[in-house]
Amino acid sequence: MNNIYEKEKLYDFSEWTTEQPSKENFYLHLHDEYEIFMFLKGDAKYVVEGNYYDLEPNDIIVIKKYQMHRIYHNSCTPYRRFICMIKPAFFQADECQEYEEAFLNLSEKIGNKIDAETVISSGLLDIITRLKKYSESAGRYSPVTLSAMTEMLYLINNIKMNPTKNTISPRVKHIISYINNNFTKNITLDELEKQFYISKYHLCHLFLQSTGLTIHQFITKKRLALAKDLIDSGKSISEAARISGFNTYSSFYRAYVNEHNQAPKK
């Protein structure tokens, strides 16, 4: 079983420091993996979709696949973090299926953050420390390291997340929610203007200011993520592009190459 985890690289984790972080180093993005982000040092806050979280050392942010997220630095204080990335296929193993619930149940109401006090009292800090130690001494995909991984996921699955206390503009949150529910359709600025009673100019300015992305960029990233998922599940590239909301194959192709620096392939 362990060879499968190693062969397919079903999980990975790392810890590193950025000595002089800046806004240019970190941007709003998404991916098709689950992420456990642990803040260790710095002066920053984290945004997931429309929710902001102030960060203290040992805070954990749990992110499900395809959730837009990024870190915002308040100063140039050196920034240290631990990140664990987990592929969805990891949870297909019988002993791991239940742990995916911690990610699937994430919502705006539940939140994405586990505060440092809970991280320490629950034993999460201890198990992450052991996870890193076992990886160095026994190997990243050794039985003891895999056991620590599943223990970490078990703890996260049984912890109640902290709802966000800091949010971006409620109007932008509603727009993000609307886009998330409709991005496979032809969403236009005229439509959003009528839907949310806001001028197109103010809408574009407010969205860019809040997320760091234009509305078009946000929608395109969501569509590309869905298209990639569909291709990986066996859909043809052209069918995946159509289902994801791209009007033409050429527009999908250009967007895909721009995002991934390579042509789409099965």
Image (tube, rainbow, N blue to C red):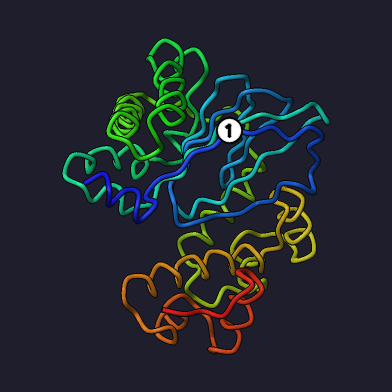
Rendered residue at 41%/10% (across/down): 121
Seen from the viewer's position, the closer of residues 49 and 44 is: 44
Rendered residue at 64%/34% (across/down): 16
Q: Position of residue 165 (x, y in %)?
A: 58, 27
Seen from the viewer's position, the closer of residues 30 and 92 is: 92
Q: Position of residue 67 (x, y in %)?
A: 50, 51
Please, what is the three-letter code of the amino acid marked with disc 1? Glu
For the view shown, which residue lies furthest in the front direction? 137
Work out whether 115 lies above or below 153.
Answer: above
Rendered residue at 63%/20% (across/down): 56
Question: On the picture, is 92 further left or further right than 157?
Answer: left
Work out whether 220 lies above or below 50.
Answer: below
Rate crowding at label 1 as few (under 14), some (14 to 19) or many (20 or more) other CA atoms within 10 Å: some
Q: Position of residue 92 (x, y in %)?
A: 23, 51
Q: How many marks?
A: 1
Q: Which residue is mark 1?
A: 15
Q: Position of residue 89 (x, y in %)?
A: 31, 54
Q: Secondary structure at mark 1?
A: strand
Seen from the viewer's position, the closer of residues 197 and 180 is: 180
Q: Quadrant of the C terminus?
A: bottom left
Question: On the picture, is 82 further left or further right than 142?
Answer: right
Question: On the picture, is 17 further left or further right than 164?
Answer: right
Rendered residue at 47%/34% (across/down): 111
